[in-house]
Image (cartoon, rainbow, N blue to C red):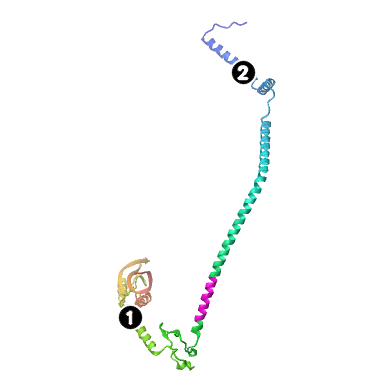
Amino acid sequence: MNQRPAPTETTYNYSKFDNTMSAVDFLAQEKIWFDKPRYDEAERCFYERINGPTQPTQVVGANTILQDIARARENIQKSLAGSTTTTSSCSNNSSSAADQELVSRINSLELENQSLHKVVDDLRAALSKLECRVAVLEKSPAAVTSVSAPAPSVPCTNGTKVQQKTSAPVEEEDDDDIDLFGSDEDEEAEKLKEQRLKEYAEKKAKKPTIIAKSSILLDVKPWDDETDMVKLEECVRSVQADGLLWGMSKLVPVGYGIKKLQIACVVEDDKVGTDMLEEEITKFEDYVQSVDVAAFNKI
């Protein structure tokens, strides 16, 4: 056999490596972790021999559910047995309450019916009075006979009332010969009407009138870029009228060297309109091509 060399530092390191390799080989050959189910089964059998077989959790859960169902059935049967006695008393109480409610509703309906009857009677009395008054007003004055009581008053056109004389019986005459309203009343009514109209006209004349004015911005376009814009503006401002006041103006480029005249004015609406301005300005055909209203505002 070969003898090992003397233990030096190098040989000592090799011996440690050999020990490590032997431990790894031992663990590689160990199979206890691959046979774990077998060991678990053996452990379970051991504890069953000592304590007896264990009841599965599913069976225990099913038993508890069945017990809860049985308790619920018992509670339902007890409640049904107790409800039979209470339902009879409740039915009696509900019937008495319904009877009381029905009686109260009948009483309220009777009171309402009585009030409605009273309202209807009042309306009938008022209607009969109105019918009597209409019948009196519809009677012809020629057919009225002498009565001890004062005669009814006849309304006039001006709102006053004239007392009709019935001191003696009056024979029937033609309607054309009877002057029901009298000429004196008509003359007084006309005078009063004229006086009121005169007072109204004086009051209206004293009241200051508000003059409606508008601010207008006009765009005056020339024919081409050779048009004299200074002369064009002079022509536009030469248009004068009562209620017309010209304002500021400026030249606005349109394109291709052409500029339009934009001029503002203030006019009175009752005296000057946009149609009149356009018609007067377009009369200068040598300078003006068209006139447009750029803005119109009430003042």
**Picture quadrant of residue 233:** bottom left
- The residue that appears at 33% across and 67% down in the rendered structure is 251
**Picture quadrant of residue 216:** bottom left
**Picture quadrant of residue 160:** bottom left
Q: Is residue 25 left or right of residue 278?
A: right
- The residue that appears at 64% across and 51% down in the rendered structure is 92
Q: Position of residue 162 (x, y in %)?
A: 41, 85
The segment highlighted magenta reads: 119-133
Q: Secondary structure at mark 1?
A: helix
- The residue that appears at 56% across and 67% down in the rendered structure is 114
Relative vertical location of residue 67 with respect to residue 109 in this rendering, above or below: above
Q: Position of residue 119 (x, y in %)?
A: 53, 70
Relative vertical location of residue 29 with respect to residue 291 in this rendering, above or below: above
Provide the major secondary structure of the magenta segment: helix
User: Which numbered disc covers residue 6?
Assistant: none
- The amino acid pointed to by label 1 is Glu
Name the quarter where the N terminus is drawn.
top right
Q: Position of residue 165 (x, y in %)?
A: 43, 88
Name the quarter where the C terminus is drawn.
bottom left
Q: Which residue is mark 2?
A: 27
Q: Which residue is mark 1?
A: 199
